[in-house]
Amino acid sequence: MSESLFSDASQRLEQALKYATISEDAIERLKYPKASLSVAIPVRMDDGSLRIFQGYRVRYDDTRGPGKGGVRYHPNVSMDEVQSLAFWMTFKCAALNLPFGGAKGGITLNPKLLSKFELERLSRGYIDAIADFIGPDTDILAPDVYTNPMIMGWMMDQYSIIQRKMTPGVVTGKPVAMGGSLGRDTATAMGAFYVIQALLPKFDRLPGKTTVAVQGFGNAGSVIAELLFHAGYKVVAVSDSQGAIYAPKGLDIPSILHFKNMVKGVQAVYCDGTVCNVVEHQVLTNAELLALDVDVLIPAALENQITQDNVADVKARFIFEVANGPIASGADRILEQRGVHVFPDILVNAGGVTVSYFEWVQNRSGLYWTLEEVNRNLQQRMVQETERIWTIAQDLSISLRTAAYVHALNRLGEALDAKGTRDYYMK
Ligand code: NAD
């Protein structure tokens, strides 16, 4: 990658600025992350040796509320990636009108190579290292790639030990038994499903006549594949890090999920099995999945999957970005010119942070919601903001991505200006 992910992400901001109602001061503020922390985390490994892991936490902006964002465990985690993810969180929270700013964290490692006890020590060590930087009123954590409710539970417990009081609001995506919200585990996919159901009918697309390919079969990808399957869409391909499976007549997603869950049960923490082990399908590479001639493509794995190198191969008519940043900005422009409808990450995958917000509200009020209440509120908010973004796009004749940024920028600009000039130490 020649250009940094963060400068690529920032280009989306540049494109939206000319349509947004926002002052020059506010624009300048939004170009830089507010605070970035880099930490070394010592971990005693099971064999007695000491290993130091590199961790990060970035609070991009907290004008509209405490920073909010997940924690990623992945070998490619870097300050550049964490800054980009925190940037996207800022715009996502504003687009959905959540009272949060944007933040993100991560640790550079392959978590599948650690035992469960090593992972717990690492997760607690990360909280020890960033404890002064986070809090239920300053910066709130959540799961992301290769982190899960169990890890969120350890993190919340460690923070509560440090504070000497139960502090559930510092982390969302916790196990329900530790103050987590019902519906948080399926929220990202559920939110994406509501967006898809609100938008595809505008193009006269009916589920039974719509083929779908999903890249990534984790928390977000597997659930969206299942929801679309049950709604009657023909999900013809799914993939994980090891490869893809393809059946032109449609895959039986529940049985693939059952297999994945069985293996996960045996492995305790991570699912070591792969969708490629399920029979009665063609095996493809992830690159081939992205190039399938399908109606809808759903990248739900990692960023930068569609770039200038492979964008010419993409044949899908509609792309719903469940992953954060799966399309590089150069490729985005080419897709737009070709008339491919791209529905942006900061809207499509915002269901996760929306239910994280509901979890935080429940933790602070002490009153817990039913699953029906969670999903009803999620649907209401996702559909409302989708329609607002759709209207902006139609009124200004701009892409849905630019419209989503304009929508977020208008809210961020208003908040930054309302805050006044104290931060600038003007005479
Ligand atoms: P996850 O760890 O549960 O799953 C990731 C999946 O991607 C796994 O199936 C993995 O095998 C697959 N994968 C990894 N590398 C791949 C590759 N090179 N090609 C194809 N597949 C690959 O993670 P998740 O929580 O489902 O997150 C997926 C994406 O969704 C990320 O971009 C994340 O930031 C975004 N997201 C997640 C949430 C959430 O609440 N979990 C919320 C918003 C956005």
Image (tube, rainbow, N blue to C red):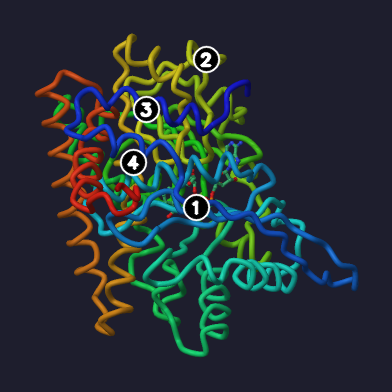
Q: Are marks 1 and 2 in contact (CB under 8 Å)?
A: no
**Residue linked to disc 3:** 12
Could you tell me how far apart the alpha carbons at marks 2 and 4 are, in whole angstroms?
A: 21 Å
**Residue linked to disc 2:** 308
Against 91, residue 248 (above or below) is above
Residue density around tag 1, few if under 14, some if 14–19, many if 20 or more, within 10 Å: some
Of circles 4 and 3, which is in front? 3
User: Is residue 338 found left or right of 37 in the rendered image?
Assistant: left
Q: Nearer the viewer, residue 200 or 158?
A: 158
Q: Earlier in the sequence, mark 4 or mark 3?
A: 3
Under mark 2, the amino acid is: Gln
Question: Which residue is at 57% across, 83% downward?
Answer: 162
Under mark 4, the amino acid is: Ile
Question: Which residue is at 58% across, 23% downward?
Answer: 3
Where does the image place residue 150, in percent across and percent down from the top left?
55, 71
Question: Which residue is at 29% across, 57% downward?
Answer: 354
Quadrant hosting residue 317: top left
**Residue linked to disc 4:** 346
Under mark 1, the amino acid is: Ala
* Residue found at the far front of this picture: 427
Q: Nearer the viewer, residue 63 or 182?
A: 63
Element under disc 3 = helix
Where does the image place residue 14, in percent across and percent down from the top left?
34, 25
Question: Which residue is at 54% across, 70% downward?
Answer: 132
Residue density around tag 2, few if under 14, some if 14–19, many if 20 or more, within 10 Å: some
Could you tell me how far apart the alpha carbons at marks 4 and 3 are, in whole angstroms?
A: 11 Å
Q: Which mark is residue 35?
A: 1
Element under disc 2 = loop
